[in-house]
Image (spheres, rainbow, N blue to C red):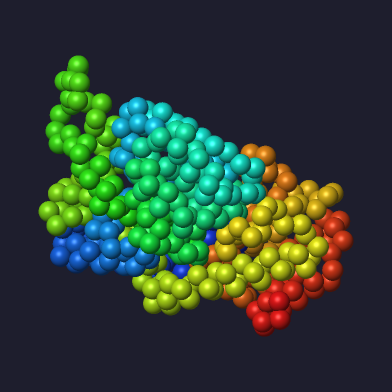
Amino acid sequence: MTIPGPIDPPARLLMGPGPISAYPSVLRSMSAPLVGQYDPFMTSAMTETQELYRQVWGTRNEGTMLVDGTSRAGIEAAITSLVRPGDRVLVPVFGRFGHLLAEIAERAMAEVHTIETEWGQVFPPSVIEAAIIRVRPTLLALVQGDTSTTMNQPLDEIGAICRRHGVLFYSDATASLGGNEFEADAWGLDAATAGLQKCLGGPSGSAPITLSDAAVEVIRSRGRVEAGIREAGDESASDFVRSNYFDLGMILDYWGPRRLNHHTEATSMLYAARECARVLLLEGRDEVIARHRLAGAAMLAGVEGLGMTVFGDVAHKMTNVVAVEIPEGVAGDAARAALLEDFGIEIGTSFGPLHGKVWRIGTMGYNARKDAVLTTLAALEAVLRRFGATVPVGGGVEAAADVYAGRG
């Protein structure tokens, strides 16, 4: 066989729902030399990363760390470690990723109950509380920002509801953390997970997680299989986490003061996760959220300036992604392909009932900036016109520029 040359990806401006273009310093950090997993530098970097993410999450939780793997690894670790077989889990579904939480809970042998709302909407707290009273779950699993619909589910009242009814509260904040408000302690979260590839501005492959003391107690109570396999017929076996890799009890021991070996930490991903949090906190958590809010408002104004229709309840849209209806007569996939081929800009399609009906355009992390927004809108205008849509000349760029100038 012919040996290929070194990896040489094309230049891309990733303006979809994620992954996005990483901060340059994050990419540089991943080229730093490797050290052993118990090297003092390594354990110090792990400790630093934990403290950085406590600030990112808005928490004092000791159980704040990374799960090695994509954001889905964090979700699976949280749910499989918190849920015992037969436990009732309630999942409010307002997009694709609610269905994912339900599926993972089912694989953990939970008794899963769902409530659903129309895609493009979110749940009022009263509806969630009514479902909790009816179902009486052990765990409420709720997505904060679902990129499939671009909706941002308000969480600030949900923790108090869960406490009133003795329910653990878990949220998947993969698409929202870093670009939208998230206050783990103030909102009463027991567990939350994310990924680097959205607002945090890094590559996919590391999943920040935070666990309350109550969540850690539940995880610890399930014990740990340290060696061998449970004998057939052991009645207590059902109480153990099915997965070794995603057993948060074991991962807590690895990240804790005892540093008990569980796996070999993904060193380069640790560096990346550390740098994502460092960059965010250096700029300021509130300032980064404000930057995402401004970029999102500019992109929203821009697509409306092009005459496009925005999907969903704009009042509950995430700051970092907008869904727009594909104009009638425009071949959606072909237009997206032209945007990529001719301008090097990627935007996203969608899933389920929205597939082929909307495009999703992201403004997150390193790309939540003025030049990226204006460049994308200018290119989108050119592509739309080429594919037969009637659009105002310069309408998108001008509307977005007005927002940046404080005129929007």
Residue visible at 85% across and 58% down in the picture: 389
Closer to the camera in the image, 358 or 181: 181
Location of residue 403 with respect to 392 vertically, above or below: below
Between 126 and 112, the residue placed more toward the observer is 126
Q: Residue at x 37, y 53 (%)?
A: 189
Above or below, comparing residue 191 to residue 176 in the picture:
above
Residue sitting at the far left: 258
Q: Which quadrant of the rendered structure holds the C terminus?
A: bottom right
Looking at the image, the residue that sits furthest to the top is: 233
- x and y, in percent, of residue 380 in the image: 73, 63
Residue 11 horizontal/vertical position (percent): 57, 64
Q: Residue at x 64, y 39 (%)?
A: 352
Q: Is residue 25 above or below residue 89?
A: below
Horizontal relation, residue 150 to residue 187: left or right? right
> Tag count in the figure?
0
Q: Quadrant of residue 187?
A: bottom left
Q: Decide if residue 115 is on the left or right side of residue 3.
A: right
Residue 3: where, in percent of width, then height? Answer: 45, 48
Residue 243 rendering spot, x and y as whole percentages: 29, 35
Name the one closer to the observer, 117 or 320.
117
Towards the viewer: 94 or 362: 94
